[in-house]
Amino acid sequence: MTSPTFDVIVIGAGAAGLMAAAELVRAGRSVLLLEARDRIGGRIWTRIEPGAQAPLELGAEWVHGYAAITRALVADAGMSVIDSSDSHWTLREGALKASDAWFEQVVRALSEAEILTAQDMSFDALLEGPLSKVLSAQERQFARTMAEGFDAADTTRASARAIASEWSGDTLGDSPHGRPQGGYACMLDALAGKLRSDRLRLQLHSPVQAVRWSRGAVEITGRTLDTSFAARARRAIVTLPLGVLQEGTVRFTPSLESKRDALQGLASGAVVKVLLRFATPFWETLENGRYGEASFFHLPEAPLPTYWTGAPAHAPLLVAWAGGPRAQRFSPGASESALVRAALAGVRQLFGQQLDVDAQFQGYYYHDWQQDPFARGAYSFVLVGGSDAREALGQSLDDTLFFAGESTDTQDEAGTVTGALHSGLRAAHEALAGPAS
């Protein structure tokens, strides 16, 4: 049987793949978009449940910074990004206290760390070495917890140079942070709307097994449900998550030997995200409404050290979160019941003296991205010495294979939906600029 032929095959229908496919279709190219899952979105996964009063985001949730490309797509769906307050409360000495403005001090210290211009080192080494005389023990612990939680990073291995660059960029600090109204599903709807064309074929339930390529020719094989498939194209855009590329479950012939150093310079970070559903948003009324506008609650020493609310939405949901080594302690093999027990234990620490948390608890939602065979982690971080790894991973091969995904972002937006979208747009433009076959 003759394999169907397309101008471009895009592997993966997450944010990067959808963006790339939309741009290629807009330019008049024929596109096969292959997705292993039974849905589009990749590590974006929005669920709508009756009575939850807010979208349930099992994966990506936040819009970090000004994120023009993301906000524009949300607007295309007739929605907006609802910015969150920056109200943080930390449990210290048995009481919840408004968090100090440590982030600005940490960023200032990082920007003044001249040693990073000469050499890279782990974030831990920087904190406990050159910055130990500049930042207090509390500030250093805040910075470490921030790197674990925001970057999903193991700070004993993560590049201090990369973290310093990212934290001084647009995604943190005084920049806005919010959520798409109606959840990230609305952005996916907007992207899907750009794919309605007879030039595009979307094929779900289709994990790719092998990519055989030479200059100007790609053949891809895999399985659709219980049936083998094959397809050909002049070019392919690969948007597989970093963890999947590192695992090698997709076989490339010739191999991606030129990407070896790049793949070794990055790591796929672990996160645990448990959505806890309660009868009411009880924290809003405690202590005469003291926490009515709270966005984040912090338990620095807990297994799940960060909890956030749906504010400004009044939803009966608390998200329990851990990243980096704390998340790795739960996975692989941690039972969901153990995760939920740990998450509820944190809520009791925060509020248990004021109400019966167990009486309020109604259920939970969770997805293990580390064990997910089509993700193998949450999002990427740079290892010591890997400053050029993202750029190298994103470089095309022989004007034939192009690479996208948040791990290839070089604008300090890796790990975000915005970074993935930008990378998909970049890869599409590179494929379009290649020589005609």
Image (cartoon, rainbow, N blue to C red):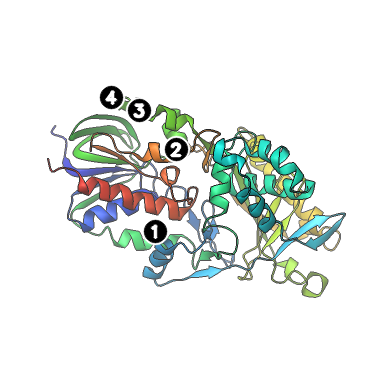
* Disc 1 secondary structure class: helix
Extreme residue in the bottom direction: 288
The amino acid on which the numbered mark 3 sits, given as a three-letter code, is: Ser
* Disc 2 secondary structure class: loop
Q: Which residue is drawn at 21% across and 49% down?
A: 432
x, y percent for residue 353: 86, 59
Name the N-terminal-most of marks 1 and 3: 1
The amino acid on which the numbered mark 2 sits, given as a three-letter code, is: Asp
**Mark 1 sits on what residue?**
188
Name the N-terminal-most of marks 2 and 3: 3
x, y percent for residue 231: 21, 37
State how many labels appear. Answer: 4
> Residues at badges 2 and 1 in contact (C-beta under 8 Å)?
no
Along the horizontal axis of the image, is 308 left or right of 89?
left
Q: Residue at x 50, y 57 (%)?
A: 47
| Mark seen at residue 258 | 3
x, y percent for residue 345: 77, 49
The amino acid on which the numbered mark 1 sits, given as a three-letter code, is: Leu
What is the distance, in whole Å, between disc 2 and disc 3 at their CAs?
Answer: 13 Å
Name the N-terminal-most of marks 1 and 4: 1
Name the N-terminal-most of marks 2 and 1: 1
Dot 1: within a 10 Å radius of its alpha carbon, few (fewer than 14), some, or many (20 or more) residues? many
**Front disc: 1 or 4:** 4
x, y percent for residue 172: 57, 58
Say which of 256 and 363 sits in front: 256
Quarter of the image that includes the N terminus: top left
The amino acid on which the numbered mark 4 sits, given as a three-letter code, is: Pro
**Mark 2 sits on what residue?**
388
* Disc 3 secondary structure class: helix
**Mark 4 sits on what residue?**
254
What is the distance, in whole Å, between disc 2 and disc 1 at their CAs?
Answer: 30 Å
Residue 376 visible (yes or no): yes
